[in-house]
Image: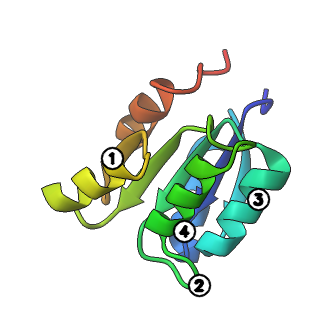
Amino acid sequence: MGNKKILIADDEPNVCSLVSSMLGKDYTVLKASNGEEAINVARSQKPHLILMDIMMPKVDGYTACSTIKTDQSTKMIPIIMITGVGHELNKKLANEIGADGYVTKPFTLQDLLDTIGQFVRYPK
Protein backbone atom coordinates (compact mmCIF):
# COMPACT_ATOMS: atom_id res chain seq x y z
CA MET A 1 0.00 0.00 0.00
CA GLY A 2 2.46 2.64 1.22
CA ASN A 3 0.41 5.59 0.04
CA LYS A 4 0.31 7.32 3.43
CA LYS A 5 3.56 9.06 4.37
CA ILE A 6 4.92 9.10 7.92
CA LEU A 7 7.98 11.15 8.81
CA ILE A 8 10.19 9.79 11.59
CA ALA A 9 12.36 12.54 13.09
CA ASP A 10 14.89 11.01 15.47
CA ASP A 11 18.66 11.39 15.78
CA GLU A 12 19.11 7.77 16.91
CA PRO A 13 19.55 5.64 13.75
CA ASN A 14 18.45 2.48 15.57
CA VAL A 15 15.12 4.10 16.55
CA CYS A 16 14.56 5.26 12.95
CA SER A 17 15.37 1.78 11.65
CA LEU A 18 13.15 0.06 14.20
CA VAL A 19 10.16 2.33 13.60
CA SER A 20 10.73 2.19 9.84
CA SER A 21 10.71 -1.61 9.88
CA MET A 22 7.56 -1.58 12.04
CA LEU A 23 5.69 0.76 9.68
CA GLY A 24 7.41 0.26 6.33
CA LYS A 25 5.08 -2.38 4.93
CA ASP A 26 2.00 -0.21 5.46
CA TYR A 27 3.31 3.33 5.05
CA THR A 28 5.88 5.25 3.06
CA VAL A 29 8.43 6.13 5.73
CA LEU A 30 10.41 9.37 5.49
CA LYS A 31 13.32 10.04 7.84
CA ALA A 32 14.96 13.09 9.42
CA SER A 33 17.91 12.95 11.80
CA ASN A 34 17.40 16.39 13.38
CA GLY A 35 14.72 19.02 13.83
CA GLU A 36 15.92 21.24 11.00
CA GLU A 37 15.72 18.33 8.56
CA ALA A 38 12.26 17.44 9.93
CA ILE A 39 10.98 20.94 9.18
CA ASN A 40 12.38 20.79 5.63
CA VAL A 41 10.95 17.32 4.94
CA ALA A 42 7.57 18.34 6.37
CA ARG A 43 7.46 21.35 4.04
CA SER A 44 8.62 19.49 0.93
CA GLN A 45 6.92 16.09 1.37
CA LYS A 46 3.76 16.98 3.37
CA PRO A 47 3.60 13.70 5.31
CA HIS A 48 0.29 12.50 6.75
CA LEU A 49 1.88 12.26 10.21
CA ILE A 50 5.16 13.11 11.97
CA LEU A 51 6.75 11.08 14.76
CA MET A 52 9.08 13.58 16.45
CA ASP A 53 11.79 12.94 19.02
CA ILE A 54 12.27 15.80 21.51
CA MET A 55 16.03 15.77 22.04
CA MET A 56 17.73 16.20 18.66
CA PRO A 57 20.67 18.20 17.33
CA LYS A 58 20.46 21.52 15.41
CA VAL A 59 16.79 22.11 16.24
CA ASP A 60 15.09 20.24 19.09
CA GLY A 61 11.74 18.52 18.67
CA TYR A 62 9.78 21.18 20.56
CA THR A 63 11.09 23.95 18.30
CA ALA A 64 10.59 21.86 15.16
CA CYS A 65 7.03 21.02 16.25
CA SER A 66 6.25 24.67 16.95
CA THR A 67 7.73 25.74 13.60
CA ILE A 68 5.72 23.13 11.68
CA LYS A 69 2.52 23.99 13.55
CA THR A 70 2.86 27.74 12.87
CA ASP A 71 3.62 27.31 9.16
CA GLN A 72 0.46 27.67 7.03
CA SER A 73 1.59 24.91 4.66
CA THR A 74 2.26 22.30 7.38
CA LYS A 75 0.12 23.23 10.39
CA MET A 76 -2.49 20.54 9.71
CA ILE A 77 0.04 17.66 9.87
CA PRO A 78 -0.47 15.72 13.12
CA ILE A 79 2.70 15.48 15.22
CA ILE A 80 3.27 12.77 17.81
CA MET A 81 6.18 13.40 20.14
CA ILE A 82 8.23 10.26 20.82
CA THR A 83 10.62 10.51 23.73
CA GLY A 84 12.27 8.72 26.59
CA VAL A 85 11.07 11.51 28.89
CA GLY A 86 7.64 10.78 30.31
CA HIS A 87 7.31 13.69 32.74
CA GLU A 88 3.93 15.43 32.85
CA LEU A 89 5.62 18.81 32.37
CA ASN A 90 7.11 17.60 29.07
CA LYS A 91 3.72 16.32 27.94
CA LYS A 92 2.11 19.63 28.88
CA LEU A 93 4.74 21.62 26.97
CA ALA A 94 4.37 19.36 23.93
CA ASN A 95 0.62 19.93 24.02
CA GLU A 96 1.04 23.70 24.39
CA ILE A 97 3.26 23.96 21.30
CA GLY A 98 0.79 22.03 19.19
CA ALA A 99 1.78 18.36 19.43
CA ASP A 100 -1.17 16.08 18.83
CA GLY A 101 0.10 13.08 20.77
CA TYR A 102 2.88 11.81 23.02
CA VAL A 103 4.44 8.33 23.15
CA THR A 104 7.11 7.40 25.69
CA LYS A 105 10.01 5.10 24.78
CA PRO A 106 10.18 2.19 25.03
CA PHE A 107 6.90 1.50 23.26
CA THR A 108 5.34 -1.55 21.65
CA LEU A 109 4.31 -1.81 18.01
CA GLN A 110 0.69 -1.86 19.17
CA ASP A 111 1.17 1.34 21.24
CA LEU A 112 2.59 3.07 18.19
CA LEU A 113 -0.08 1.77 15.79
CA ASP A 114 -2.86 2.71 18.20
CA THR A 115 -1.53 6.27 18.49
CA ILE A 116 -0.96 6.60 14.73
CA GLY A 117 -4.46 5.22 14.13
CA GLN A 118 -5.96 8.17 15.99
CA PHE A 119 -4.69 10.45 13.21
CA VAL A 120 -4.13 8.37 10.07
CA ARG A 121 -6.51 5.76 8.72
CA TYR A 122 -4.74 2.39 8.63
CA PRO A 123 -4.19 1.46 4.98
CA LYS A 124 -6.20 -1.77 4.59
User: Compared to 122, does 53 lie above or below?
Assistant: below
Marks 4/1 in contact by CB < 8 Å: the verdict is: no
On the image, numbered disc 4 is attached to which residue? 10
| Residue 25 quadrant | top right
* Three-letter code for the amino acid on which mark 1 is drawn: Asn
Position in image of residue 55 (x %, y %):
42, 75
Say whether marks 1 and 2 touch (CB < 8 Å): no
- Where is residue 31 drawn, in percent x and y? 70, 61
Label 4 or label 2, whichever comes before in sequence order: 4
Decide if residue 121 is in sight here.
yes
Q: Disc number at residue 41?
A: 3
- Mark pair 4, 2: CA separation: 12 Å
Is residue 12 left or right of 24 when viewed as pictured? left
Disc 1 to disc 3, C-alpha distance: 22 Å
SS at mark 3 in the image: helix
Report which residue position mark 1 lands on: 95
For residue 63, above or below residue 104: below
Q: Nearer the viewer, mark 4 or mark 3?
A: 3
**Residue lying at 67% horizontally and 35% vertically, measured from the top left:** 48
Return the residue at label 2: 58
Of circles 4 and 2, the one toward us is 2
Q: For the residue marked with disc 2, what is the amino acid?
A: Lys
Which amino acid type corresponds to the residue marked 3 in the rendered image? Val
Mark 4 touching mark 2, by CB under 8 A? no
Residue at mark 3 to residue at mark 2: CA–CA distance = 15 Å
Q: Residues within 10 Å of mark 4 (few under 14, many from 20)?
A: many
Q: Is residue 120 left or right of residue 25?
A: left
Q: Amino acid at mark 4?
A: Asp
Q: Earlier in the sequence, mark 1 or mark 2?
A: 2
Q: Gap between marks 4 and 3, in whole Å? A: 13 Å
